[in-house]
Structures are given as C-alpha cells and as structure tokens.
C-alpha cells in the first residue's frame, strides 16, 4: 500500500524545479496551504496510478473541508465504493498533540542535504556528528517551512482551515483520535491498534 504524502511530492517538485514546485514553494515557505486546485490535481493524478488500486495511505491531504469533499468525488470517479455511510475512506486518523510540542518537534527537525530520508532532531535524535549527517556525512539543514515563526503560522492556518475536517469525518463515522504524545514507537503502536480496531469494527 503506497504512502502518499502531498508534502513530499511538492518538495520533490521544488527540488526538481518543476512548474508545480515553483508555484508551491512560495506558499510552503510562508507556512500557508498550497491552493486547492494545485493540490487536488496532484492527488487526483497520484491516486490514478496502478499501485493505489488496492488501497493507499494519504498523508497531508485533505487539509480542508473542500478538499475532503473533492476527495470523495475523486474516489467515486475512480469507482471506489463508499464503505461507511457515504464515506469513501476506511479510517481517518486524528493525531492529538499540544501545539507547544508541535512547535518543538517541527522546528527542531534537521534534514540531510544528501538524502532527505536521513532526518534528525536537535533534542530527540541528534546526529552524533553535530551539524553533519552521521549516516553519510551530508550537511544538516532546517527546512524553510520548519522555522519556528513559520510553524506558528502553520498552526494558525491549521486551526482555521484544517481542524473543521475533524467534524466532517466524525459525521461520516470514520474518525479515530489517538494521543500523539510520547515516544515514536509508542505512538506508532497506538496508531496501528486504532486502525486495526476500526477495520475490525467494519468487518
């Protein structure tokens, strides 16, 4: 099952200098959401790939109610049958965490310039090589959208635009909320347990 992260797709386009990347960068650097039309077109195209036919994990989409409604339409267009009431998704995982912790987690993240999958954190998982990646030696840097002032803007945007989709999916009966504080492994186990429980309840 593919993990489809709209943020990763946008960042890949930014790195490649594509037209989509150039358009997305100005919004992401300011902590704002990329406009719906760009994001929806990207998701529609990605969900049409053969590897998504058997299911997928969406990460970073939808970010507002309009996108959630459009996602329902995209899935209907692709012949996906609503599974719970009118819901086309099996489960929507809502990760609850204090905003102060969110700021600390995101602003402390450092990424390797040689390999974006080499990710560290100044407090939770620092590189033993200081400001270099202790896996490959590449320079570690803070993404522009991870700067603390940008993260605070992102949280304001989240409260105004993204939080309402919690109610949207709660009404559809597919929302599962978990406590997202604690160690990564503990949160991962909570998430897997929650998804398994939601799937079992529908079987």
Image (cartoon, rainbow, N blue to C red):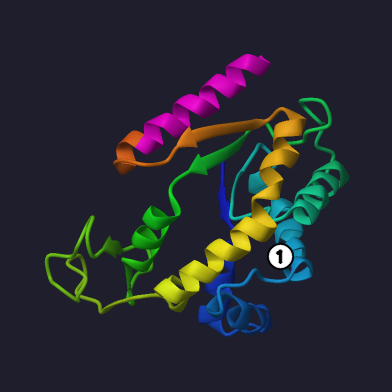
Residue 17, position in %: x, y?
A: 57, 85
Q: Is residue 190 left or right of residue 201?
A: left
Q: Is residue 130 left or right of residue 85?
A: left
Which quarter shows the C terminus?
top right
Residue 113, position in %: x, y?
A: 33, 77
From the viewer's side, name the closer residue of 200 and 65. Answer: 65
Residue bearing mark 1: 39
Is residue 171 depicted above or below 25 in this figure? Answer: above
From the viewer's side, name the closer residue of 1 and 63. Answer: 63
Residue extent of the magenta highlight:
187-203
The answer to whether residue 35 is seen in the rendering is yes
The reply to whether the magenta stretch includes residue 196 is yes
From the viewer's side, name the closer residue of 190 and 133. Answer: 190
Residue at 65 percent across and 38 percent down: it is: 55
Q: Give the number of marks.
A: 1
Is residue 159 depicted above or below 56 in this figure? Answer: below
Q: Secondary structure at mark 1?
A: helix
Residue at 62 percent across and 78 percent down: it is: 27
From the viewer's side, name the closer residue of 30 and 4. Answer: 30
Q: Is residue 42 left or right of residue 141?
A: right
Residue 87, position in %: x, y?
A: 78, 33
The reply to whether the magenta stretch includes residue 154 is no
Magenta segment, prevailing SS (helix, strand or loop): helix
Q: Quadrant of residue 92?
A: top right
Residue at 82 percent across and 32 percent down: it is: 81
Residue at 38 percent across and 37 percent down: it is: 187
Which quarter shows the N terminus?
top right
């Amino acid at each position: 099952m593919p993990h489809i992260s709209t943020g990763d797709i946008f960042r890949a386009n930014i790195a490649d200098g594509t037209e989509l990347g150039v358009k997305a960068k100005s919004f992401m650097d300011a902590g704002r959401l990329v406009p719906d039309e760009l994001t929806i077109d990207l998701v529609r195209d990605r969900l049409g790939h053969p590897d998504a036919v058997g299911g997928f994990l969406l990460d970073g989409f939808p970010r507002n109610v309009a996108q959630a409604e459009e996602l329902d339409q995209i899935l209907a267009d692709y012949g996906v049958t609503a599974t719970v009431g009118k819901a086309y998704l099996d489960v929507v995982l809502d990760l609850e965490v204090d905003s102060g912790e969110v700021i600390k987690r995101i602003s402390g993240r450092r990424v390797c310039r040689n390999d974006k999958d080499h990710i560290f954190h100044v407090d939770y998982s620092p590189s033993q090589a200081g400001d270099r990646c202790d896996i490959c030696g590449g320079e570690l840097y803070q993404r522009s959208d991870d700067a603390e002032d940008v993260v605070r803007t992102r949280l304001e945007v989240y409260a105004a635009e993204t939080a309402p989709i919690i109610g949207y999916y709660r009404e559809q009966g597919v929302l599962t909320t978990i406590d997202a504080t604690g160690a990564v492994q503990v949160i991962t186990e909570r998430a897997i347990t929650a998804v398994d429980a939601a799937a079992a309840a529908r079987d």
